[in-house]
Image: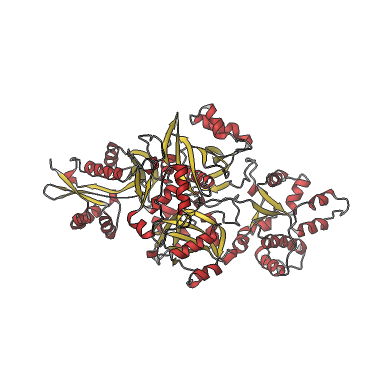
Amino acid sequence: MSEFRILKSHNEVAPFLHKVRALADANRNSLGFFPEVVYHDLAAKGTLWIALDNSSELAGFLTFGGRYLQLGVKQLFVDERFRGQRVGALLIGDLARYAEERDYLSIKARVASDLKESNTFWERMGFQLVKRETGGKSRKREILVRVRSLPTRSLLNLMDAARVDNLSAIDAPKMRTELTRSTKHFAIDLNVFFDIAKSREYAADSGLLLGAAMAGLIRLSVTSEFLSELKRSGSDEKDDPILRFAETLPVLPRLGGESEDLVERLRQVVFPYRDATKRRATQERSDLVHIASSIQCRLDGFVTRDKALLNAADAIRSEFKVEIVAPADLVDPSFDDMGSPSAISVTSKDNQQLAIVPLPSSAEREVSSFLLACGQAEPHVQRVIGRGTTASPRDVHVAYLDRKVVAVASWDRPTALHERLDSHMIVDESVSIAQRIIDHFIESIIRISAHPSVSKARIEMLADQPLTMSTVQSCGFGNFHREGSSLWVEKPMVGRIIAEGNWSDVRSKLLRVTGLALPSEMPAFAEVGESGVELHDSSGLGARLSFFDLETLLSPVLCLFSGRDGLILPIRPHFARDLLGDIGRQIGLLPTMEAVLRLERAYFRSPSGVSVFKVGTPVIFYESGSHGGSKAAIGVARLTYSDVRSVEDASIAYERQGALDRRELTDRSKQDRVHVITFDNFKKFDEFVPYSRLAELVNLKANLQVPQQISGDVMAQICMGGFN
């Protein structure tokens, strides 16, 4: 049997690249396709290794890559002449040692299910099957995701705790995004009010809506036209109790002088073919005045049961950025707490109905049964779903998939005194949409737990949940503690921007809360990009992290190192809603795009100017002024991926993370190619930064209709202006 050696450096590998490419092309069925330039890039980065026999014959090769905590095998190939001689095992063994030395926690491989021999090999190498995925549409293959965990000691274990060994993990979205849900403000139509006052057919839906308002979950008002319409209906102004009650409701100001133009514009959208002087003209004008008042007062929506208005809802939303909804759209009678500001309702792309809502009191028995079925003991069930006390309240949220309980999460409500917040999360990982539920809960826990300064978040989960484990690891959680059938993980968090001016303060608080020490002075970006950032614990144990991994560990932070340039990326208002979630106007209670559940989200654009999009670059999203947009910078995120892909590849790999469907992707493509970027950790600005201020800071090109590079100084000024 031959002896083999592995070449890893670019100089050693480069002479064999033409052979690697030829073997890869001849075995596309098992390896997939990479353009030639990819192999040159991998070799240059030292992530293409080749195995040679003692006569320098190419026996096999391995390509791989990785981000925070996990390496991923891209291709592994052994020439038929050398199979059965442990060439593949030699390559993977070296890769495992390479990963452990660099503090990776696991290695992932994706293998087509029909490749029986390959799957047998990966099992033999310790790669456990953790997930099944659907492959490309053309070949309709099932892809098996396999993971091998590593006994790595890393920075995640520096916070004074024993590590749990042999924990499996899998691939998952790597990042976080904000899904803020502020209290929504609606005006209501007279027909909704009459439903309650006169106990009509739809009184239940309208009553739940009123209950949500009384509980402070939403705000309800009426327009001045509401009272005028009520009086025209024949109410006795002196003795009618309904009119007396209506007059106690919050009333919006009367329309201003420019209102006639707005009413006429609305008429062209809602009643384009009706004569304003004919029968029903008064009622139609009244309907239009209600909506115009809602627009002028910048409300989120108008609640009505009028069919003509509801039929025009899409057009009104597109043109005026206000929602026209029925009571049943906002309040599902089966969920008495559906109106919570943090409630989300989504119809997935495979037509599954997902609702994530505060735990309804009527559902506590059902949720308890779910937790018991997951192996939780009765005392632990109460710990998960307990509401806390008035002094230390807790929030409990339930995920329903097609009205069946599939997940529960709960967490402490933060206060200024809390530096550590505990949370619990139990998810049925067998459901197809489990990853999206996990993403949303973890994002919520990180966002809610993030102290304005420095804090620590802890999550209790089941020890045998690999999907949850992988996701928390990729978000910077570590320091594992077993407690019976449960597992605790924790992470340090810095909930604000770090710049040179507050570096010392953050450093001292991070050391006090977590035992981790940053360098005494904030390094420049050129230094960080070259050599990373050194972190130490109180015992002196340390490790060096890239700036990207440092931000992941301390997320949801953004580090404004001196010289760290950024981008301003324009986005249309309706894409901002679907991709970024509630940015201050849209309704979080209505079904939305799946992308809003994701930790990492995708944005698609025409494949031009691609070179300025580099992984790790801070991106400021600028919402255009069209269709009621704010014409301002609305928040900042971090770029995690950038590449030009075919429309089919982008649709398969990223459509669920983005705000476009296949047709829209095609519209944005050029010669069937589209630029895909993904980003994480979106943080909405406390105060939007208007176009006029941006123009003072930088010479804006093309009225910000195209992406624009900005210096680190400008990036810092925009972020400091956006965050209080």
Q: Residue at x 42, y 47 (%)?
A: 553
Quadrant into which the N terminus falls: top left
Residue in front for this viewpoint, 425 or 538: 538
The quarter of the image holding the C terminus is: bottom right
Which quarter of the figure has residue 319? Answer: bottom right
Residue sitting at the far left = 55
**Which of the 4 quarters of the picture holds residue 14?**
bottom left
Is residue 400 something one can see in this rendering? yes
Place of residue 420 in the rendered image (x, y in percent of width and height, measured from the top left): 51, 40
Q: Is residue 149 left or right of residue 360?
A: left
Query: Residue 180, image x and y in percent?
Result: 56, 51
Q: Is residue 489 left or right of residue 6?
A: right
Percent x, y for residue 55? 11, 49
From the viewer's perspective, is residue 628 above or below residue 428? below
Q: Is residue 643 visible?
A: no
Where in the figure is residue 697, as x and y percent of width and height? 50, 69
Q: Is residue 107 left or right of residue 16?
A: right
Q: Nearer the viewer, residue 26 or 360?
A: 360
Which residue is painted at 63% across and 40% down in the image? 334
Residue closest to the eye, 328 or 388 = 388
The residue lying furthest to the right in this view is: 238
